[in-house]
Amino acid sequence: MMDFLNYAINGLLLGQVYALLALGFVVIYRASKVFNFAQGELMLLGAYTVWSLSLGANLSPWLAIPIAFVAALAYGWLIERLFFSRLVGESVFSMVMVTIGLVILIRGVVLVIWGAADRQFPALLPTMPVIVGELILPTSMLVGAGVTLALTLALWYFFNRTRAGLALTAVAEDPYTAISMGIGVKRAVTLAWMLGTCIATIGAVILLNGRSLNVLSADVALAALPVALLAGLESIGGLMLAGAIVGIIQSLVAAYIDPKLGGSASSIVPFVFMLFILVVRPTGLFGWRNIERV
Amino acid sequence: MKTLKAFCSGAALACSLFGAALPARAETVYQVPSLSDFSGPFASVMPLFAGAREAVVSWWNIEKGAQLGVKLELKPYDTHYDTAQTASLWPGILSTTKPIIGLSLGGPDTTALQQRLPNDKVPMILGSASNGFAWRPNQWILSTRPTFVHEIGAFVEWFQKTKVGGTRPVKIAMFTSEASPSYADMGKGVAAYAKANSKIADLVEMVYVEPQPADLTLQLRRVLNNGAELILAPASIQQAIAIKRAMQALGKNVPIVFNAHNSLSVLEKPMGGLVPLEGDYEAHALVVTGADDSEARRFYDLLVAKHGLKAPWHTFTGMGIGQTLVLVRAVEAAAIKHGGNKLTGELVYKTLVDTRFPAKSFYGFSGGDIDFSVEAPFPLRDPRINVGQVVGGKIRTVASAVPVPQLAKW
Amino acid sequence: MDPSGIFFTSHARDRALVRTKRQAATLALLIAALVIAPLVLSDRWVSLGYAMFITMIAVIGLQICTGYAGQVNLGQSAFMGVGAYGCALLLHYPQVPIILALLLGGAAAALFGALFGLTAARIKGFYLALTTIAAQAIFQFLVLNLPGDWLGGAGGLHLENLELLGVNLGNDRALYWLSLATLLVMTGGAFGIVRSRHGRSFEAVRDDDVAAGMMGINVAAAKARAFLVAAFYAGIAGGLWVIALRHVSVEQFTLFNSIWMIAMMIVGGLGSIVGALIGTVLIQLAREGVVSLGPQLVDLIPSAGQDIVFASMNVLLGTIIVLFLLFEPKGVMHRIEIGKRAYRLWPFPY
């Protein structure tokens, strides 16, 4: 029983970290309807910046992380200025293609600047788990869950109660109407990208805590996709619930089914789940239902 | 007297002139393709390999190659550690360098080339351990080490004999991953080994996790609760680190054994020193790059001093040196037998298969003698491994030339 | 647009793909040059050649699905893998002729692809792209976890020497001609598809699927068909890879490969078969160039270090792709079309 609880809680926490990564997707999607395939690569940029600052330049974590956030904001701004500002008005298809191109580009940039070596990502949070009686809780994931909760609340407040956030929501629903209402679409999109990159960096710090960092670390963002889908690509609040569901299922599969299979079925659980959601309820649990008009 | 002196000096002068007039021994230059990875996953350790390969070739050219009239030239090619890239590079390599032997790096080039090489007639030497799925006859990519499973099996048997008394099976648990064919093969092979040798090893659980796991405390606890006395961690570096951290978190001290690519020297930096690794082992058919003075260390120092080797004393340097030593010894044996200017890939392959290379010709960089045969792409007849352990904060070689069990294919 | 002075008097001639005698002659010359190439060029070019041809086939399939039907397909590599494994399994039985194995491998891939396309009935827009990412992951999982004797598990499958019509397929030239022949057939087929009503329905679905639905096009079926075609092409390409390498394993077919294929399609130009061909050639040549020039560059600039030079390839190519997307989203084909038009109109400006 204790074991089951352990696996379930660990899954819950893991799901929150996925939700954190998925937040980046959702923020960008909410503002520009662009599905950002390069979210994992944005995470890479943030992660390598943190690495450079803390292990390369030997700054203390309290200094390195805020500087990295500022850098992430700068990256987001740069990417949006360079690539997406020209594409305003183009079809979403083109913009998605650009994000796919960005995957290759950012990977290349990371390779040139930092090299292909495996780096040791600094353990900014303690690596020892918290042991409460029989429960083993990895500290970084506990902190991650806390951060996700805080961010979710903050972003929910931002998108639903502040002027700038509502502007972003309006732009996502219908950019043309938003323009005619006087909302600055370009600024909204820029803000979205800056936020998205910043969130990716936060996710990197939590997820890669004490682990190794190389270009392949970007693939973890793909596992966060199903969480975003389950929540519905526009829903911020739903991400925590969706993360919990996906995380718990993956953890239980890893604990009980993997040993029997002699393989790792848990790695495709998120994807099978995603297929399932896409077929049964494509808008996810809390997504907006758009009426398509010609 | 005067005439005798004059005569002698005159004769000496004539002899030396005559000697000088003899044409210098003609040197045949052979180009050796050195498959490398400068932009893929091995890019960070490639300088260690490349440096080791160059240094050994430079040493051999001067020491032995000159006498035999053979000069080896390494030509590096970047394969990105990618099968398609290697496959498309190879015909070009074949026609430009006309190699008699080559240096392979790992999985993708084995995949791309193993079917072609028997036709192209070029043997290649691999420094990594072999895998079960590569165990087929008539392979021209020859690994200097047996399979990972052989190395693990040898260590388990040694551990059972020396640490558990040899009378009862030792309880083992292993962590691996499905993400790479090598890791998946290790899992399969060790499970088969434990099943076939239940008197020696009792496999408590084979745990499959991601190659870069966040936290393995739960899994480790489960495995220790089931009585595991030895943890096998031959897969990725990150898994090794996670297991070690989990062990620390649980406050337990069950020994862990690693392999060459995640050896103690590789783990030293990420774990912040050797002290946390006290009591853990590494087991493989390469040199244990420890603190002991040994023949291998002296050879390494020679390469550093005289042949421009800049790479540190590290497992990957050892792998590069060992791999290249096997290559040059093969060329040497073939040149002695057939003549330095008549070498072909086929002759070198035959030499590799027919000759039993004694361990001392490798200065301790191999596990034992190396004896290839046609049945397998690794030394099947009596390979040996070395075992290292962290004792008193330093890596020491605690066992060498440990015999490897004969395994059935899995 | 036709050169001035060319008029057609029959519908068939008007609809023809190759419009003038001059074009036919040029095409014939090009094909002849390609056929003779291995006899003249070095081995390196021959192996590069068949690698390019095989990739071209897959990219053409991708073009039909993504460029013509507007369905972003990130699983083309996985479909190639299914075709490769299917072909390899069949080729283990020596009685099966190679061409049949190739076709059946393609069919297997097509089935796999259609499964994902069928979900199109329920899913709109980019969600379909996500199912293709799932396809990659599921493909890898299945190959690694199904019993080893079925699909070879981690080590993959090996094949011994293959013979086609008495020619040993172990040598590079035979592979070159086989892949060239297959490419020509598949390209002809692709043109046939896109110029037919199916192709037009694909374009309608791409441009506005709601409107297309209202016009009576079965949108879900069209999307599924697009995936089927793309997967078939990928399957054929995968089968050819198996024949070339005589070995197949799951690590040859990754998500990153799928992304590269999309990049080739983008550079060539979305929505054009010839664009797919040109894009593939350009990107493969660029990659080759960096790989070959790499060692020389390193010799010239020792301080650059081999790792920087080789890693710069990704940056270079990535930049090219993104620049194309920004400044010439219609790809190289668009430039070529403009050039052709300008040439035909010259010296008039319009």
Image (cartoon, coloured by chain):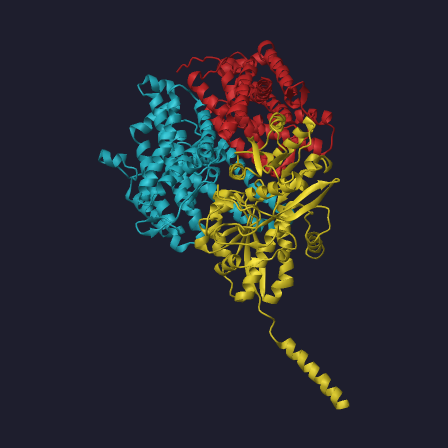
Whole-percent x, y for residue A253 in the image = 52, 23
The x, y position of residue B388, in whole percent, is: 67, 44
Query: What color is chain A drawn in?
Result: red
Q: Is residue A187 left or right of residue B117?
A: right
Residue C275 seen in the current view: no
Q: Is residue B140 above or below residue C8?
A: below
The x, y position of residue B170, in whole percent, is 61, 36
Which residue lies at the image location 51% right of the left edge and 42% below the top edge?
Answer: B82
Q: Position of residue B223 (x, y in %)?
A: 60, 28
Q: Residue furthest top?
A: A161
The quarter holding residue B303 reads bottom right
Q: Is residue A17 above or below residue B36?
A: above
Q: Quadrant of residue C188?
A: top left
Q: Is residue B1 left or right of residue A190?
A: right
* Residue drawn at (41%, 14%) of the image: A293
Quarter of the image that includes the N terminus of chain B: bottom right
Residue C121 visible in the current orientation: yes
Chain B, chosen colour in render: yellow
A53 to B330, vertically: above or below: above
> Of A228 and B271, which appears nearest the observer?
B271
Relative depth, front residue between C142 and B46: C142
Considering only vertical position in the picture, is A135 above or below B88? above
- Numbered label tally: 0
In front: A263, or B255? B255
- In the image as oriented, which residue stretches furthest toward the right? B1
Most distant residue in the left direction: C10
Q: Which chain is cyan?
A: C
